[in-house]
Image (spheres, rainbow, N blue to C red):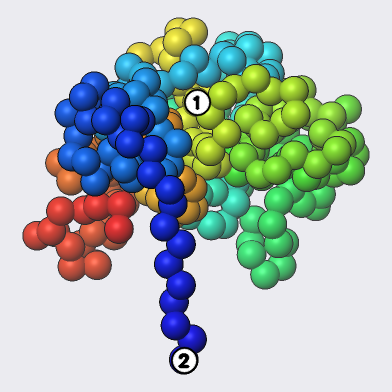
Amino acid sequence: MKKKRWHIMPRDTEKENTLIRELGVNPIVARLMVNRNIDSDEGHRFLEGTLKDLLDPFTLKDMETAVALILETIEAKKSIVVYGDYDVDGITATSLLYRFLVKMGARVSYYIPERQSEGYGLNLEALEHIISDGASLVITVDCGISSYDIVKAVCDRIDIIITDHHTAPPQIPPARAVINHKQPDCSYTDKNLSGVGVAFKLCQALWLRQCGEWYLDDLDIVALGTVADVVPLVGENRIIVQAGLKKMNELPNLGIDKLIDVAGLHDKTITAG
């Protein structure tokens, strides 16, 4: 059996002492934070970040366009379909946006592709069915950024908003709006959001335009998808998961409550682990 080789990072005692002095952290914690390039400013958010520290969702490219189109579609009482994915991130993103749009009074349904027969991402046959059913707008969650040809094939017959977090290809699909912080020309500073995280930012933006604070009602759903997608728990992800776990332990969504029940965890504190 091979022996492990530990490579110890060189210390920066000046930075460590700054964190100890300004944040009041233990020396070991200070050293770990320095190793992760967390300075004093980021350290405050890392240790004590709250929902008030969330970034402005309108700094995401195309967010203004997406919000205007959704509000216009709801006002006209036209049909919206949330098109998701079959993993935990995709299912929670679908649930979050669907529930939010229902509370806004939208005519909304959802579609999650079947893993074996349809595979990942947008499916042309499914979109044709959605169009024939009379939908006016499709909003993708956790998928769509790689579906250039499919979007091009239907974009003259139905409006499409893509929300995704996967790496953007050279050709961005010709949708009405594409919200993805990993687009080369998106100035959004937090590049670690999951699919449900991006859907959450869309809900936050809609709330800022005209809705009630029930965009925070499903933070436990957002936390579940964020942790399950194994994105780094820093920046906004850390804030969302901290707040979502609090709700999950105090007053969880009915579906999550049943998951906790069948897992035999009702007498335990739910953590990211």
Task: Identify the image quadrant of the C terminus.
Answer: bottom left
Measured from the top left, where is residue 156 in percent x and y? 88, 27
Helix, strand or loop at disc 2? Answer: loop
Horizontal side of residue 256 vs 84, given as left or right: left
Disc 1 residue type (three-letter): Lys
Which is more toward the observer, 227 or 102? 227
Quarter of the image for residue 223 reads top left
Check residue 258 in the rendering and tell me which mark sits there, or answer none. none
Give how far across and how far down residue 239 sits, in percent. 34, 32
Name the residue furthest bottom: 1
**Residue occupying image coordinates x 62% and y 40%:** 165
**Alpha carbon separation for disc pair 1 and 2:** 47 Å
Q: How many marks?
A: 2
What residue would you read off at disc 1?
A: 201
Tell me residue 163's x, y (percent).
63, 34
Secondary-structure class at tag 1: helix
Q: Position of residue 180 (x, y in %)?
A: 65, 31
Residue that badge 2 annotates: 1
Residue extending farthest top: 210
* Marks 1 and 2, the one that precedes in the sequence: 2
